[in-house]
Image (cartoon, coloured by chain):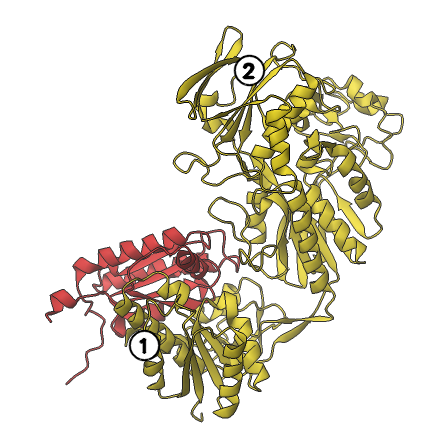
Chain colours: A red, B yellow
Amino acid sequence: MSEQQAYEPKVVAFLCKWCSSAGSDLAGVSRIQYPANATPITIPCTGAMSPMYILSAFNKGADGVLVSGCHIGDCHYIEGNYLARRKMHLTMELLKFIGVEPDRFRMSWVSAAEGAKFAQVVTDFINDLEPLGPQDKLKKVVSS
Amino acid sequence: MTKKRTGVFVCHCGTNIAATVDVAKVAREMADENTVAFTQEYVYMCSEPGQESVVQAIKDNKLDSVVVTCCSPNLHEKTFRDNAQRAGINNFTCEIANIREQCSWVHNDKAKGTEKAIKISRSVVRRVNRNKPLEAIAVNVTRKAMVIGGGIAGIQAALDIANAGVEVVLVEKQATIGGRMLQLSETFPTLDCSQCVLSPKMVEVKRHPKVKLMTYSEVQELSGSVGNFQVKVLKKPTFVDPDKCKICDHCTEVCPVVVPNEYELNLTARRAIYIPYAQAIPASFTLDESACLGLNPVVCGKCKDVCEAGAINYDMRPETVIEDVGAVVVATGFDLYDQENMPELGGGKLEDVLDGLQFERLCSASGATKGHILRPSDHREPKDVVFIQCVGSRDPAKHCAYCSKICCMYTAKHARLYKKHVPDGRAYVFYIDIRSGGKGYEEFVQRTMEDDDTLYLRGRVSKLYRHNGKVRVLGTDTLTGQNVEIDADMVVLAQAMVPSKGTTEIAKVLKIGRDKDGFLAEAHPKLRPVESVTAGIYLAGAAQAPKDIPETVAQAGAAASKVIALLSQATLSRSPLIAKVRPSHCTGCGMCVDACPFIAIRLENGKAVVNEALCEGCGSCSATCLRAAIDVKNVTQLQIHEMIEACLA
């Protein structure tokens, strides 16, 4: 099996517990189909999202990283998503600086009511990742 | 650290999971994990035999932690944590891997679904590996509740809570309680007078020793958590002392300002100083600051001059009140879908085209026409009245996708009321379907059709316009396949129910979720219909979904009983998943202190210290700390890194 045929982007999706994780539950309850490439990790709040998690995911072989939280102004913890927005913006700048394609990292706001939007966000992300091919800029090379 | 002995329990959920995920393979893969000592799959893990098998397996295999791979943790996290406790291990060593909502239901490809389910399950197994046994934090309960919204839902909830001996603060934005129901004339299917049903309840809630009524007030902020909320309420100035006001009406006689009367849906006008209804509660006038010439005796001051009771005080100022409550009921009601969105039906600008609530005011004995149905343009009795159902409802392409549920019934009621007032008049109803589920409802609609000779036409109306002093209605009758043209004296639109403006605002203030249509979201559509996702905040009435009065009263009672059950507990347990500092790593830089939204971290002797009563466990501190010196218990950075690794294996 050649790599071209087999390429399926590997994505880690960090979802806040209150909005986006609940939104992904709603996508499930509504049976909206989307690509299976993104594995979800539920975190309490996007405010808890350390830039290290993103670098760590790329380092461990992720082709893309998605961070999704409550809409601005709707954070269950008042201002966690504001902190996240600033931090993720800087992380994006850092990724660009070190040569990681900006399309490999995405942040979205998905509320608990937006199951369809969640499915769309994942679908669009995977579609955008496919032409980029595997990520090797930050991937740890295991010496043979 | 001694090696964990984790048990992994894979649920088939009938075929909900098993159809698109190879559950046996998930179990086999988990068995290969270093820390997993036991795996089992079962068709319904949440059933009694399923739960018993988990308890038994924990005991038999001396398991110290549990992963159940099943549905969303919102559904059965508590179920399985309780089982862990029953089996004698700490409940916080049990975690859920969501392979249904986040996997089997959204991926049809079994191979890919299985692969993802394995990744999710493995990441949770790795997380549990470092979970610490924790004890829930006991907190005291404030035995007092707040009800937001003083319509029938709020009044009923407040009375039910108060009758159980619990203090209630009832907050209403308007100058009187009563809400939408107070604007109604008669109610279906019994045609009893709305005010006759509601007014005694309004009086009861006002007089109840356990109820504190705050009208003309708005909730501005909510902090704290279940059992101990602090709510900031703004009391707007009414400029009239309700204790002194004798409702003599002298002030309105002299007030020179005339503005539309919103309580009469702008069918009439009121003065700047006004009382919404003769039977308003509190029985007092209110001076509308935005309409008044200036609250200044030099500019006007006429009302103050004639007030013999000395009730008018221009120096009243807004007042902020902080209420400590243990639970909140949100009952902020509905508005009608804006006619402006439907230019083909006149966009709200055509004379003699009314909405359902305006028609209620025309029928009401307390309304502007004293219960005589007269059309607004020339005050003549309308002889041809067209009622249009589903205006803005059931129209996913352009308007609201949902059915507003009550319009079929209230349109039938309107037709009957009209025929009662104008026996020689002709009533036409345009409908898509008649939905009359409810006790006595179908019979009511049948009587409207048969006894009252109302002409029901199945079809939509495409256009309304003024023509020779009438409103021309262009529609179709899909049963005969004919176009229909009616020159109507009056048209009544049954617009969709939408969440009230106040509902949208309060959802932001309370940080509670809304559904795709903007109604307040319940925690579970079937099993937790009166709870919001936030513990301690409950929902009642049309703010949650379109519903009629009996359903609203039932839901308000249900919300009240939830509040009473919550507040009758001596203490509540709070999640122990809060921040913890590693003093050895902390340099006292104070960045976490700045990042904390709850002011729960302070520096003491050069080290960060967490106030456990204030910390909500959001983790903003841990993401800020450069040295990983602060972490949320059981969601530590190390755990997340290991979960990431598991997702990418």
**Taking B10 as reference, is B548 left or right?**
right
The chain identifier of the residue carrying mark 1 reads B
Q: Position of residue B308 (x, y in %)?
A: 89, 25
Q: Which numbered disc covers residue B351?
A: 2
Residue found farthest to the right: B308
**Residue B274: which numbered mark, if any?**
none
Q: Quadrant of the C terminus of chain B?
A: bottom left
Q: What residue is shown with label 1?
A: B645
In the displayed structure, does residue A3 sit left or right of residue B35? left
Work out whether residue B285 or residue A24 is closer to the camera in this orientation and state it. A24
Q: Residue furthest front?
A: B450
Q: Which structural element holds mark 2?
A: loop
Helix, strand or loop at mark 1:
helix
The x and y percentages for residue B169 are 74, 51
10 Å crowding of disc 2: few (<14), some (14-19), many (20+): some
Q: Which residue is rendered at x = 41% and y = 38% of the image?
A: B396
Above or below, B204 relative to A129:
above
Q: Position of residue B150 (x, y in %)?
A: 70, 42
